[in-house]
């Protein structure tokens, strides 16, 4: 019978600040609670729409609101947290405390999948808070390289927590009795892949470099790539990224001409930065097509960005095409 290290024991051995470990523990405990709420579905009346729209002008699901409140309440009660920002909230939420950490999160990413029982997830990012004053919105606008922790929980056939703190990436599985157990230590992303993830229905709207890259993949072994490719698109970033963490691949949500003024669909602070840190720490790459995501200086709290991330060598093939 295999025995697993639990999150508390793993954190005890992690060379990181005790206060940061408290923040991660709070997030992990809240995600365990979210897993139970998500799993209850229609039984708890939590499916369906909330009848409201969020700052992204997206219709909110009941679970978007429920999970946002769970994380907001938990983090406000966590002493080292000076402020939080949610994809679902227009403004930041200072906690009234100074110093410590800022947390940004997407409480339930992929929520369009909830009502059809497809995997969804929570994405979180932890940044240093300013010393000496309560955080303002500008204090959140830090490049992704400043993150001191990041990760996600994926609510799927298993509920898993994938986390990077001091270094590396480790994945925990939620047990039946609510323990996070270290089942996947030292996760690494395969450098090469033959699997791409993109919403093909947008093909006619992509810029030429993306058209050329995907066309090269679709030509298979008789084409320029000399190998056949598979395609996946779950329309839940957490689930698509988790697959890439487990078996490699490249995930793309590029700019497209449907809304030419919008750089991309995904959010820098709540999706691209945390996922970028996790993927990079596992040996993968995360870019906006050209620039590393973690080097982007945020200008706005809800800034959107094109995303190309995953297997390092494949991301570089895309980057070369974008530069051609
Ligand atoms: P589309 C979910 O709404 C999300 O933000 C990501 O999780 C996902 O990758 C993407 O949007 C899906 O977008 O346009 O394919 O529905």
Image (tube, rainbow, N blue to C red):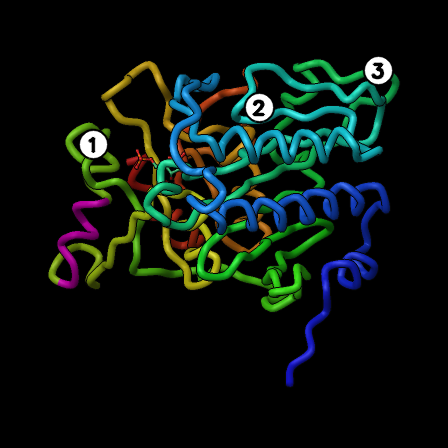
Residue tagged 1: 208
What's the residue at 28%, 17% (across, down)? Answer: 260
In terms of image quadrants, where is residue 96?
top right
Query: Does the magenta segment cover residue 218?
Result: yes
Q: Earlier in the sequence, mark 1 or mark 3?
A: 3
Answer with left or right where residue 28 lies relative to residue 260: right
What's the residue at 82%, 61% (across, down)? Answer: 13
State the residue in front, 214 or 76.
76
Query: On residue 133, which mark appears?
Result: 3
Q: Is residue 299 above or below residue 104?
A: above
Residue tagged 2: 297
Q: For mark 2, give the secondary structure.
A: loop
> For the residues marked 1 and 3, what is the alpha-carbon distance in whole angstroms?
47 Å
What's the residue at 57%, 23% (across, down)? Answer: 297
What's the residue at 82%, 54% (across, down)? Answer: 15
Quarter holding the C terminus is top left
Q: Position of residue 167 (x, y in %)?
A: 69, 53
Q: Which residues are magenta?
A: 214-221
> For the residues marked 2 and 3, what is the alpha-carbon distance in whole angstroms?
22 Å
Res 303 seen here: yes
Q: Position of residue 123 (x, y in %)?
A: 55, 40
Q: Earlier in the sequence, mark 2 or mark 1?
A: 1
């Amino acid at each position: 019978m295999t025995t697993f290290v639990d999150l508390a024991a793993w954190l005890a051995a992690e060379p990181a600040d005790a206060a940061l470990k408290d923040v991660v523990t709070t997030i992990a405990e809240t995600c365990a609670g979210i897993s139970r709420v998500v799993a209850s579905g229609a039984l708890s009346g939590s499916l369906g729409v909330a009848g409201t729209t969020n700052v992204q002008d997206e219709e909110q699901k009941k679970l978007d609101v429920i999970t946002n409140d769970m994380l907001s309440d938990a983090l406000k009660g966590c002493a080292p947290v000076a402020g939080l920002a949610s994809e679902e909230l227009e403004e930041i939420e200072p906690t009234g405390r100074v110093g410590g950490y800022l947390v940004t999160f997407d409480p339930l990413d992929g929520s369009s999948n909830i009502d059809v029982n497809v995997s969804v997830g929570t994405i979180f990012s932890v940044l240093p808070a300013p010393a000496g004053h309560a955080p303002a919105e500008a204090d959140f606008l830090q490049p992704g390289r400043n993150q001191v922790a990041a990760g996600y929980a994926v609510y799927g056939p298993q509920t898993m927590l994938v986390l990077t703190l001091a270094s590396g990436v480790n994945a925990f599985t939620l047990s039946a009795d609510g323990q996070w157990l270290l089942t996947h230590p030292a996760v690494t992303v395969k450098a090469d892949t033959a699997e791409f993830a993109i919403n093909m229905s947008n093909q006619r709207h992509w810029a030429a470099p993306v058209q050329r890259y995907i066309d090269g993949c679709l030509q298979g072994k008789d084409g320029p790539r000399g190998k056949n490719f598979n395609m996946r698109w779950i329309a839940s970033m957490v689930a698509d990224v988790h697959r890439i963490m487990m078996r490699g691949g490249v995930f793309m949500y590029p700019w497209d001409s449907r809304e030419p003024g919008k750089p991309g669909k995904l959010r820098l602070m709540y999706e691209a930065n945390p996922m970028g840190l996790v993927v990079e720490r596992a040996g993968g790459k995360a870019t906006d097509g050209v620039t590393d995501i973690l080097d982007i200086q945020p200008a706005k709290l809800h800034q959107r960005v094109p995303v190309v991330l995953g297997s390092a060598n494949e991301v570089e093939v895309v980057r070369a095409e974008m530069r051609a």
